[in-house]
Image: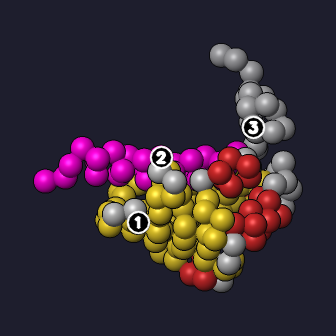
């Protein structure tokens, strides 16, 4: 049976991952940096894009995702978290969607994240994150009759451009 402290640790680790994803989708690089260890590493897309420090990770994400026309939604579920004192390993199922209104494409996929977390100075942080795609599909938005981006956090302040009722 798990202790109350272990259950609390699991919830804190989940919050770290959820914060990671929210900051990723909202392009909040400072918020994302706050939950990464200084010596964090990342290997995205089966290691195709690998980075050896927090600074390198944030620079890559900023360069790749900061455009106003780049929209993403990352959702994880089914966490499998193993605690080992001040360290933890986790596997997360990922589903993501990207819509790029400038480059006119939509991407959807699924993957499994493999993460390592460490508790430093009493706070759980993300030390290592990797994922390998189960699948990924991409298609031009021009191939979708009637496709229109009708709201954007950045372009429309999150408000839909569709008329009310």
* Residue 35 relative to residue 90: left or right: right
Tell me the distance, in whole angstroms, between the alpha carbons under discs 2 and 3.
Answer: 22 Å
Residue 44, located in which quarter of the rendered image? bottom right
Front-lying residue, 52 or 119: 119
What residue did someone put label 1 on?
A: 87
Q: Which marked residue is nearer to the observer: mark 2 or mark 3? A: 2
Question: Does residue 64 show up?
Answer: no
Estimate the x, y position of residue 155 in percent, counting from the top left. 84, 38
Mark 2 or mark 1: name the one nearer the start of the chain. 2
Q: Secondary structure at mark 1?
A: strand
Up the image or down, 81 lies above or below 128; here it is: above
What residue did someone put label 2 on?
A: 15
Neighbour tally class for label 1: few under 14, some 14-19, many 20 plus, Cα within 10 Å: some
Q: Which mark is residue 153?
A: 3
Mark 2 or mark 3: name the one nearer the start of the chain. 2
Q: Magenta stretch: give its range.
A: 1-26
Tell me the distance, in whole angstroms, between the alpha carbons under discs 1 and 3.
Answer: 35 Å
Neighbour tally class for label 3: few under 14, some 14-19, many 20 plus, Cα within 10 Å: some
Q: Residue at x 76, y 44 (%)?
A: 148
Q: Residue at x 48, y 75 (%)?
A: 134
């Amino acid at each position: 049976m798990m202790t109350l402290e272990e259950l609390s640790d699991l919830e804190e680790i989940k919050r770290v991952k959820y914060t990671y994803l929210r900051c990723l989708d909202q392009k909040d690089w400072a918020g994302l940096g706050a939950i990464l260890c200084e010596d964090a590493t990342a290997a995205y897309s089966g290691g195709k894009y690998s980075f050896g420090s927090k600074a390198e990770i944030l620079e890559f994400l900023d360069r790749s995702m900061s455009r106003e026309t780049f929209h993403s939604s990352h959702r994880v579920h089914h966490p499998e978290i193993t605690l080992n004192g001040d360290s933890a390993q986790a596997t997360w199922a990922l589903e993501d969607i990207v819509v790029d209104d400038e480059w006119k494409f939509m991407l959807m996929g699924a993957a499994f994240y493999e993460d390592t977390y460490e508790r430093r100075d009493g706070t759980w942080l993300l030390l290592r994150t990797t994922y390998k795609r189960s699948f990924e599909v991409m298609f031009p938005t021009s191939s979708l009759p009637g496709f229109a981006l009708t709201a954007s956090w950045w372009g429309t302040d999150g408000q839909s451009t569709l008329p009310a009722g």
